[in-house]
Amino acid sequence: MRRNPDFLLRDVAGALVLVPVGKASVDFPGMITLNATGAYFWELLENEQTVASLVEKTLSRYEVDETKARQDVEAFVAKLMPTGAILEN
């Protein structure tokens, strides 16, 4: 999976938000707020990733166990996949 280039990460008044542009703004007329971890996942999705690779990178960056890392990654993907912000291969 990878991020949709029609969603841009922006800092809006101190909040990190994904803003759809172009066709994505018609399909998803809103914004998605991310926390710092979500923004980190978004950065990683510039390149092709799997849930397993995101979990591995989360474990190397944050002091969490594998179960928590997997839950966080899966929650992030579940939130963004239906919006079109994340694309599958």
Image (cartoon, rainbow, N blue to C red):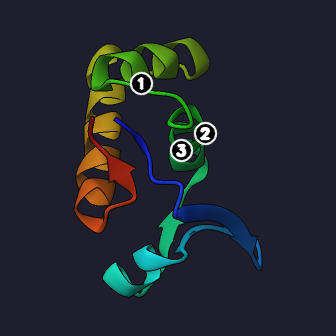
Viewer-proximal residue among 70 and 28 = 28
Compare marks 1 and 3 and give the one earlier in the sequence. Answer: 3
**Position of residue 47 measured from the top left corner of the image (x, y, whole percent):** 53, 29
Q: Residues within 10 Å of mark 1 (few under 14, many from 20)?
A: many
| CB within 8 Å, label 3 to label 2 | yes
Figure check: 42 above or below 28 = above
Compare marks 2 and 1 and give the one earlier in the sequence. Answer: 2
Location of mark 3 (residue): 42
Amino acid type, residue under disc 2 in the picture: Glu
Which residue: 51% across, 69% down?
A: 33
Q: Residues within 10 Å of mark 3 (few under 14, many from 20)?
A: many
**Position of residue 10 measured from the top left corner of the image (x, y, whole percent):** 70, 66
Left or right: where 7 falls relative to 68: right
Viewer-proximal residue among 63 and 36 = 36
Amino acid type, residue under disc 1 in the picture: Leu
CA separation in Å, label 2 and label 1: 11 Å
Left or right: where 84 falls relative to 8: left
Badge 2 element: helix
Mark drawn on residue 54: 1
Location of mark 2 (residue): 43
Figure check: 9 above or below 64 = below
Which residue: 42% across, 74% down?
A: 24
Figure check: 57 above or below 38 = above
User: Which residue in the rendered view is the most extreme toward the front?
Assistant: 23
Badge 1 element: helix
Quarter holding residue 74: top left
Amino acid type, residue under disc 3 in the picture: Trp
Figure check: 80 above or below 87 = below
Dividing the image into 4 quarters, which one contains the C terminus? top left
Quarter holding residue 55: top left
